[in-house]
Image: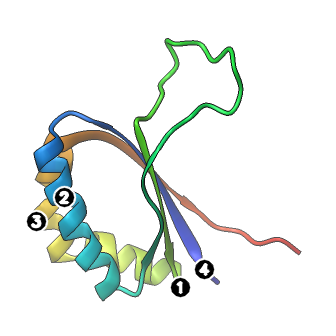
């Protein structure tokens, strides 16, 4: 069953974050993942959102064929090497989405 990673980011250093995404793309492919949404601009669905609530600048959605492949990707030595680019380049949050519709 496919699993998904939803990521959101508020960019701090565009150059470093761009380098992270470029490197991440190669790693994702190596571990059988694919981008479904990459670097999308965010528009709130409902008006009246409080400005003090966290609003991401960019969102991303990845698909992997299994949770095992996803974990291998993000635990890989290649990904571990580029984590500093992510940390220095943006404030991020990522979650794993699992499930299906019957």
66 in relation to 19, above or below: below
Task: Kindly identify the residue that appears in the image at 40 percent across and 36 percent down.
Answer: 57
Horizontally, is 101 left or right of 70 in the view?
right
Q: Residues within 10 Å of mark 2 (few under 14, many from 20)?
A: many
Residue at the location (71% across, 69% down)?
A: 99
State the SS at label 2.
helix
Q: CA distance from mark 1 to mark 3?
A: 24 Å
For the residues marked 4 and 3, what is the alpha-carbon distance in whole angstroms? 26 Å
Left or right: where 21 falls relative to 4: left
Q: Return the residue at label 3.
A: 81
Please state if 71 lies on the left or on the right of 17 as rendered.
right
Q: Residues within 10 Å of mark 1 (few under 14, many from 20)?
A: some
Q: Which residue is mark 4?
A: 2
Whether label 1 touches label 3, CB < 8 Å: no
3 and 17: which one is in front? 17
Q: Image point 16% across, 75% down: which residue?
A: 78
Quarter of the picture containing the N terminus is bottom right
Q: Which x, y percent locates residue 88?
A: 13, 41
Q: Residues within 10 Å of mark 4 (few under 14, many from 20)?
A: some
Badge 3 or badge 2: first in the primary sequence: 2
Q: Are marks 4 and 1 in contact (CB under 8 Å)?
A: yes
State if disc 2 and disc 4 touch (CB < 8 Å): no
Q: Earlier in the sequence, mark 4 or mark 1?
A: 4
Crowd class of label 3 (few under 14; some 14 to 19; many from 20; radius 10 Å): few
Residue where numbered disc 1 is placed: 65
Which of the numbered marks, if any, corresponds to residue 20? Answer: 2
């Amino acid at each position: 069953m496919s699993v998904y990673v939803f990521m959101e980011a508020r960019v701090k250093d565009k150059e470093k974050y761009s380098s992270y995404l470029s490197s991440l793309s190669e790693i994702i492919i190596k571990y059988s993942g694919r981008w479904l949404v990459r670097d999308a601009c965010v528009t709130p669905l409902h008006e009246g959102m409080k400005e003090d609530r966290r609003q991401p600048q960019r969102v991303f959605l990845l698909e992997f064929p299994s949770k095992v492949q996803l974990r291998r990707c993000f635990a890989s030595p290649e990904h571990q090497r580029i984590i500093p680019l992510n940390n220095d380049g943006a404030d991020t949050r990522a979650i794993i989405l699992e499930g299906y519709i019957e």
